[in-house]
Image (cartoon, coloured by chain):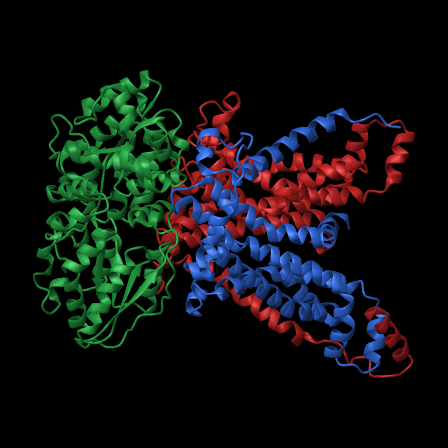
């Protein structure tokens, strides 16, 4: 029930649009012995995508050979609820998750199965963009989750009017960004809106993740994630922390970001009202701005990839964020029915359904469908970002799980607030 | 005639500001279009009046949360009264050592904070298969309301004239009859106090709903309000409208049961 | 009406003779309540101690691991810093709320008409649940769009939650805002019960207002103070709603008080066993405080003091 996780979860699943989605009951799943075909329960997150899922399931159920029942579970504390049900022996046959640490925990406990071991699903994973599969896989690359939603990369949003008034272009390198800090400060505008209040500290993590990736490449975090000794002591982490300190000291985030919350609407309103120029945020930010003002979202909100760091080892095409959401199959589920259902997640109808809702699907065949998206340019921008990304690093807190993420976020917040030096920050996180 | 107490007057004015300024901000904002809030801020004089924020809140899940909470509060009151009245009766009229031991046990129970035992309570609720049901909130809330309720009820019953008890007992009435015809009618005011306080506790409860429920089907008002902080792009006017709506039932209790409520509270220090 | 009937019935039956032991409620009457209270309060109290010797992730069955949690507990610097923050907040709240509540209670107990009217405004925070009040303040404290942005002379750049001092001050302020009315109500009731004759006698002796307050009002409020402070201390040791909503334990871990630490360990990190050690500490601390205060004032006084609640 971590707020940052909740918040992330909610925004990431496009729940900004889900204000009035009707509730569905959520009964227990079946635990009967596994026969290859049969009735399978499927727990998913309650959000606007449910209609697309239900349509796909209705079509699937007509073809015979077992049926799937969709249980749309409200988003608050979804993972906790899933955890309780997995522990209580009332586990669903299939479930939706964000991959990463929590999903891997189920894999290690043998509660979920290798997707390739399902009958006829040996090559199913090949139909998705490669960069999004990693978060749905174990450390050795075994796929335990099949993508079922759109992708949510993180990138830089900006207020077009504010940039036009200052006569400047959005940054492509870190030194551009540092120059812009001075430009906007002179104009009395906060260069970068940042929600640095404790329950929003995951927004600060985006800066650390991107800077570490740009400076040292994705391998740095991969080592951290697999728990390698001294992985946090990689010089790239320290340099990223130093860059953050420089940005803070130069006033890039203003002075009161420590009291601004993302959930409270503080940072996004700063950008839309022109009091701040930029914000680093996930792709759901568009929906958030649209909720407040459709006009600003469509015409005033610009977006560019995170800038490159000169001399950094990381590919500037790498991205950070939520690669996508995944369906996992629990052990004991009817394997043939599950495999057949997972196959439908790559169908043209399912992909088109996601696109119509404004999502950006991660199947290789999604490209044509994007032309009919509600905002084709924005959808296309995201798809290209993901398709061209050599690596898509999952949000660190989700990849690492709460136990590590909570003290890490606390230390990071202290770095931003100037309570820890970059060296102290590295010492703190290395000791976790 | 005493001279007026200027110091106290100044103090009360400061406190008035501390109370009234935020309340003004909340009320004024709740009736203000959200676009205006960003431009004017919370303290501006309202220039446009709208009920839209309330309409939006009422069109969402909020009424259902209110319904959930009303049901839970009512059920908790019933559970507490059904259990606490006989306990208090037995403590007051039972006599003997066991009665006073029971009383002392409940007295010590006052010192057990719910937060400190929430982990085992979570385990118990899970084992009972009650997780994410109304009962997950009703049962622990009622249990932790029992000690205070027993104290209040026993206090009230002690005030009943002993002769009345002796008379009805001599009359050969069973304890059940005595309870129904003598104790309950004469304990109405302490029963009312217990009911009001238990209902308030249930209405304001946060910990048990936070940990023992998940879904919108069982969500309480307090959690519904808490969700506003994380859930959507927050719209302060709507949040404030929801907060004001959440206070309406309590305000009603204050208006209708203020006398017994304040008397009960005042009794706490006065005896 | 009913009492009248009962009284009449009583008088009539008193004239008859019957077995005196008959008609008294036995212990059996208390049994359902006892059992119920046992399951949800006494059993968990023992259970939390048991769980503190186990490793439990909320997913599998708790398994006994001996003293491991406790060894970790005593070497955990987070526990130490959380304890310090807990007591800083506790004492801050205790001082701020007691002073304000005593003054407000004594003031509002006065017979003046304007006081009655103002009192009804003063006690308005009572109608808000603590969750609602905390959410309200979270919104109002936004540095760019909330109250601080309009009162720059008072709040500067409004970075109230971004520093430890600021965050602690906010927590005390919001807690006080919410709880002072309740405690003031306690004091008001007690102050009204002070016999007028005491003040009249003091006035004849020529005691001024301040002396009267110090020599009569304060001593007479002593029992109420114990009650009120017990509530504050036990509440302060165990409640974390305001922290959860307002600061989420931050900035960093600067306002991570013990109950919040316990909540996070138990229900976010799923270290249920380790969280239980913190819960045991809280249980011991708050029970000890209650018992000491009960001793201090005497068992019977505590009993009668709480009867009206």
Residue at 67% x, 74% y is C29
Q: Nearer the viewer, residue B200 or C300?
A: B200
Q: Which part of the image, by quadrant, shows the N terminus of chain C?
A: bottom right
Q: Colour of chain A?
A: green
Q: Which chain is painted in blue?
A: B
Residue A304, by quadrant, is: top left
Seen in the image, is A106 located left or right of residue A267? left
Residue at 52% x, 67% y is C39
Seen in the image, is A101 located left or right of residue B181? left
Tell me: residue B258, above or below residue C149: below
Residue B110 appears in the figure = no
Q: Nearer the viewer, residue A294 or C5?
A: A294
Residue A143 appears in the figure = yes
- The percent coordinates of residue B259 (x first, y second) are 74, 52
Tell me: residue B44, above or below residue C263: above
- The percent coordinates of residue C9 (x first, y second) are 86, 77
Q: Which chain is painted in red?
A: C
Tell me: residue B83, above or below residue C20: above
- The percent coordinates of residue B251 (x first, y second) are 64, 50
Residue at 52% x, 48% y is C238
Seen in the image, is A404 located left or right of residue B136? left
Q: Nearer the viewer, residue B146 or A423?
A: B146
């Amino acid at each position: 029930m971590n707020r940052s996780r909740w918040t992330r979860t909610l925004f990431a699943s496009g729940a900004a649009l889900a204000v009035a989605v009707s509730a569905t009951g959520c009964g227990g799943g079946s635990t009967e012995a596994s026969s290859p075909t049969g009735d399978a329960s499927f727990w998913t997150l309650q959000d606007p995508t449910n209609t697309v899922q239900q349509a796909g399931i209705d079509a699937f159920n007509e073809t015979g050979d077992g049926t799937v029942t969709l249980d749309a579970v409200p988003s608050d504390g979804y993972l906790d609820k899933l955890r309780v049900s997995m522990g209580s022996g009332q586990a669903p046959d299939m479930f939706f998750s964000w991959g990463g640490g929590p999903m891997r925990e189920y894999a290690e406990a043998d509660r979920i199965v290798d997707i390739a071991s399902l009958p006829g699903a040996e090559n199913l994973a090949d139909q998705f963009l490669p960069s999004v599969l990693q978060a749905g896989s174990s450390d050795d690359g075994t796929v335990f989750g099949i993508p079922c939603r759109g992708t949510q990369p993180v990138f830089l949003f900006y207020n077009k009017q504010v940039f036009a008034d200052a006569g400047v272009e959005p940054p492509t390198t870190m030194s551009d960004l540092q120059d812009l800090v001075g430009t906007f400060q002179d104009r009395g505008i906060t260069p970068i809106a940042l929600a640095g209040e404790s329950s929003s500290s995951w927004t600060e993590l985006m800066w650390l993740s991107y800077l570490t990736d740009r400076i040292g490449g994705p391998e740095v975090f991969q080592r951290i994630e697999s728990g390698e000794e001294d992985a946090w002591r990689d010089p790239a982490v320290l340099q990223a922390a130093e860059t953050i300190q420089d940005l803070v000291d130069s006033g890039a985030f203003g002075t009161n970001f420590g009291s601004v919350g993302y959930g409270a609407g503080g940072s996004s309103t700063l950008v839309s009202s022109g009091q701040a120029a930029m914000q680093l945020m996930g792709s759901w930010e568009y929906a958030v701005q649209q909720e407040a003002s459709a006009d600003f979202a469509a015409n005033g909100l610009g977006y560019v990839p995170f800038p490159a760091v000169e001399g950094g080892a990381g590919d500037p095409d790498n991205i950070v964020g939520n690669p996508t959401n995944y369906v996992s199959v629990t052990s004991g589920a009817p394997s043939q029915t599950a495999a057949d259902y997972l196959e439908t997640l790559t169908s043209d109808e399912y992909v088109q359904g996601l696109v119509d809702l404004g999502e950006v699907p991660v199947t290789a065949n999604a490209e044509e469908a994007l032309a009919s998206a509600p905002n084709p340019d924005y959808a296309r921008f995201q798809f290209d970002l993901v398709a061209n990304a050599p690596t898509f690093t999952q949000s660190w807190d989700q990849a690492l799980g709460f136990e590590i993420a909570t003290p890490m976020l606390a230390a990071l917040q202290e770095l931003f607030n100037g309570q820890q030096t970059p060296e102290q920050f590295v010492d703190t996180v290395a000791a976790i | 005639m005493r001279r007026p107490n200027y110091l106290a007057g100044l103090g009360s004015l400061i406190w008035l500001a501390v109370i009234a300024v935020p309340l003004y901000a909340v009320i004024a904002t709740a009736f203000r279009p959200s676009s205006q809030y960003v431009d004017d801020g919370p303290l501006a004089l309202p220039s446009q009046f709208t009920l839209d924020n309330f309409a939006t809140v009422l069109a969402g899940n909020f009424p259902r949360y209110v319904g959930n909470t009303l049901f839970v509060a009512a059920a908790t009151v019933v559970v507490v009264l059904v259990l606490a009245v006989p306990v208090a009766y037995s403590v007051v009229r039972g006599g003997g050592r066991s009665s006073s031991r029971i009383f002392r046990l409940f007295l010590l129970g006052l010192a057990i904070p719910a937060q400190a035992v929430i982990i085992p309570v979570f385990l118990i609720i899970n084992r009972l298969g009650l997780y994410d049901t109304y009962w997950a909130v009703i049962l622990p809330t009622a249990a932790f309301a029992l000690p205070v309720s027993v104290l209040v009820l026993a206090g009230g019953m002690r005030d009943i004239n002993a002769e009345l008890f002796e008379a009805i007992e001599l009359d050969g009435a069973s304890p059940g009859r005595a309870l129904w015809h003598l104790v309950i009618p004469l304990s109405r005011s302490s029963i009312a106090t217990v009911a009001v306080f238990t209902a308030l506790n249930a209405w304001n409860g946060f910990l048990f709903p936070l940990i023992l429920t998940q879904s919108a089907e069982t969500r309480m008002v307090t959690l519904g309000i808490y969700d506003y902080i994380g859930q959507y792009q927050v719209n302060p006017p709507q949040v404030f409208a929801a907060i004001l709506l959440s206070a309406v039932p309590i305000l009603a209790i204050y208006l209708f049961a203020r006398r017994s409520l304040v008397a009960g509270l005042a009794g706490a220090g006065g005896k | 009406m009913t009492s009248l009937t009962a009284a009449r019935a009583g008088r009539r039956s008193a004239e008859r003779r019957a077995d005196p032991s008959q008609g008294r409620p036995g212990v059996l009457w208390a049994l359902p309540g006892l059992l119920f209270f046992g399951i949800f309060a006494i059993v968990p109290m023992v259970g939390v101690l048991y769980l503190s010797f186990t490793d439990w992730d909320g997913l599998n069955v708790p398994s006994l691991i001996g003293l491991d949690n406790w060894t970790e507990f005593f070497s955990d610097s987070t526990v130490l810093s959380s304890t310090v923050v807990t007591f800083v907040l506790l004492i801050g709240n205790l001082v701020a709320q007691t002073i304000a509540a005593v003054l407000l209670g004594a003031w509002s107990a006065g017979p003046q008409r304007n006081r009655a009217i103002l009192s009804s405004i003063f006690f308005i925070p009572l109608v808000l649940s603590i969750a609602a009040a905390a959410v309200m303040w979270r919104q109002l404290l936004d540095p760019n769009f909330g109250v601080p942005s309009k009162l720059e002379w008072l709040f500067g750049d409004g970075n109230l939650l971004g520093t430890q001092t600021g965050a602690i001050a906010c927590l005390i302020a919001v807690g006080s805002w919410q709880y002072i009315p309740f405690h003031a109500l306690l004091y008001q009731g007690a102050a009204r019960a002070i016999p007028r004759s005491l003040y009249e006698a003091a006035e004849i002796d020529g005691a001024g207002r301040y002396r009267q307050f110090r020599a009569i009002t304060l001593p007479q409020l002593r029992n109420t103070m114990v009650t009120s402070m017990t509530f504050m201390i036990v509440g302060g040791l165990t409640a974390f709603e305001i922290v959860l909503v307002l600061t989420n334990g931050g900035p960093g871990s600067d306002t991570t008080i013990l109950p919040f630490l316990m909540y996070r360990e138990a229900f976010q990190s799923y270290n249920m066993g380790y969280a239980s050690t913190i819960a045991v500490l809280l249980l011991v601390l708050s029970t000890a405080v209650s018992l000491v205060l009960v001793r201090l004032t005497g068992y019977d006084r505590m009993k009668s003091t709480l009867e009206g609640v």
